[in-house]
Amino acid sequence: MATRVFRVTIRGRFRDLTDEARRRLRTAQPEHDIFLAAYTAEGSFTYDERLQFFNLRYEVRADDADGPGAAAELAGATAQLEAEQFLGVLGYGHHELRVDVVDATAIWDDVDRRRPARRR
């Protein structure tokens, strides 16, 4: 059993934001610019200036005891739950959530396989 690293992106749209939520989002927007985004365990929250769309990026680690597909599914579900809780606690209404999961471990393994062997 190995631990796999997944990069999970949750995309969605804001919905029914209160005036207070809009004010908080506009005030904090420079701290949530797309160019500051990163995949982290805590999540990285970015959104557009018009307060229409947002992204949350998570790095999720999962054991692949049941296979990489099951681990990816678990990573996606874990990140989606985290995103929904985050948005709910802050009172940010949302809809049209879309979850994209990339197995970074598989990418890194592929790079290692393609790298030429070093000569001694």
Image (cartoon, rainbow, N blue to C red):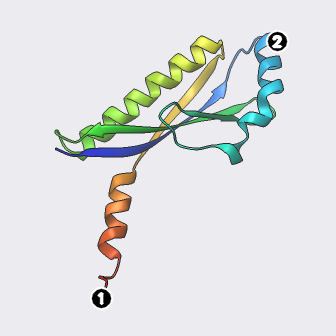
Q: Residue at x 76, y 11 (%)?
A: 18
- 31 relative to 39 in the view: left or right: right
Quarter of the figure with residue 27: top right
Q: Nearer the viewer, residue 53 or 30?
A: 30
Report the Cα–Cα distance between label 2 and label 1: 64 Å
User: Which of the image's four quarters has the N terminus?
Assistant: top left
| Element type at mark 2 | helix
Which residue does the numbered mark 2 point to in the structure image?
19
- 7 relative to 87 in the view: left or right: left
Task: Give the foreground label among 2 and 1.
Answer: 1
- In the depicted structure, whether residue 69 falls above or below residue 56: below
Where is residue 116? Give x, y as percent. Answer: 33, 82
Q: Residue at x 51, y 35 (%)?
A: 98
Crowd tier of the residue under label 1, counting other residues whose Cα lies within 10 Å: few below 14, some 14–19, many 20 or above? few
- In the depicted structure, whether residue 106 falls above or below residue 3: below
Q: Which label belongs to residue 57?
A: none
- 52 relative to 45 in the view: left or right: right
Where is residue 76? Give x, y as percent. Answer: 39, 34
Where is residue 109? Give x, y as percent. Answer: 31, 62
User: Which of the image's four quarters has the C terminus?
Assistant: bottom left
Outermost residue, bottom direction?
A: 119
Which residue does the numbered mark 1 point to in the structure image?
119
Three-letter amino acid code at disc 2?
Asp
Three-letter amino acid code at disc 1?
Arg
